[in-house]
Amino acid sequence: GRAIGKDVDPEAIHRARTALIRAVFRPLAGKMRGAYVALGSDAPYQPDADQAGRRALRNRLMTLLVTADPEGPALAAEQYRNATSMTDRFAALAAIGVAWTADAAPLLADFRTRFAGDPLVFDKWLAVSARAEDEGVLERIQAILADPAFPKNNPNRLRSLVGSFAMNNPVQFTRADGAGFRFVTQFVADVDTRNPQVAARVLTGFRVWPMLEATRREAAREALTALKEAGGLSRNTSDILTRMLGE
């Protein structure tokens, strides 16, 4: 999309990428599962190069299998439940959460219960929640923000959630119906009153809009224009908005 630079449809790119992964790796799924098993180890966790390399390869195989192999989601869920390190548990959660498999909701709930007391790990949970590729992601993000327990004034939590959505979930942020764009501009208008730095940073997710196809491009323009016309923005956010509109 960046190379083409115009009339980009992120949803079409996503469909094509998924189809390519399945076409290439589904015929190899059996061998990949065998390699995944062979790379497992009962040895105590060590942060050395050998173990790190094995974990990285094993988790990459798992992530590809979640997309390419009907057995992949169950394999990832089993890894999540049996993991002895945060690296393996989070890799499984990310693969499951982004693809939004049948296990996504219960495992995300389990992860939050386990690690909500650790701010850095909680940020990881928020980022995965925001990157889910299904259409229900916006409703779930809004529910997280509405939760009385969510720290609404914490800049790291806000960036991890809404920043991840705007910058790392191109399929749902650039939805053709404009819902992703409107959600982000409404968030920016609200948060700007409390934390202009976060609002301005999240707004930079719109930098992709000029290269989108016409329907998405117009929806983004409408959302940005409505934000500008509402007025009352901080200097930081107004400056970024002006840049996003190319004025």
Image: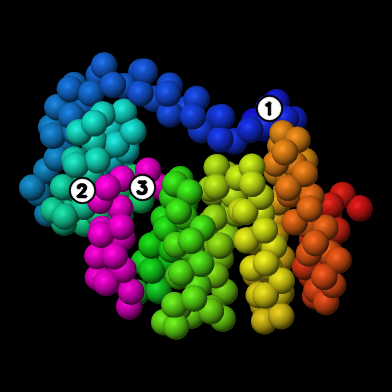
Residue, far front: 177
Magenta segment: 98-117
Q: Secondary structure at mark 1?
A: loop
Task: Specify the label residue 100 is tagged with.
Answer: 3
Secondary element type, mark 3: loop
Real-space Cα separation, disc 3 to disc 1, in angstroms: 28 Å
Q: Nearer the viewer, residue 186 or 92?
A: 186
The Cα atoms of the two marked residues, 2 and 1, are separated by 36 Å
Asked whether disc 3 touches disc 1, contact meaning CB atoms under 8 Å apart, the reply is no
- Name the kind of residue labelled 1 in the image: Ala
Query: Which residue lies at the image location 28% right of the left edge and 32% below the top edge?
Result: 65
Q: Residues within 10 Å of mark 3 (few under 14, many from 20)?
A: many
Q: Main secondary structure of the magenta part?
A: helix
Q: Which tag, 3 or 2, sits closer to the chain's start?
A: 2
Percent across and percent down for residue 127 are 45, 58
Task: Give the residue pinned by disc 1.
Answer: 3
Inspect the image, locate mark 3, and give the three-letter code of the amino acid beneath it.
Trp
Q: Would you say 55 lies left or right of 213 here?
A: left
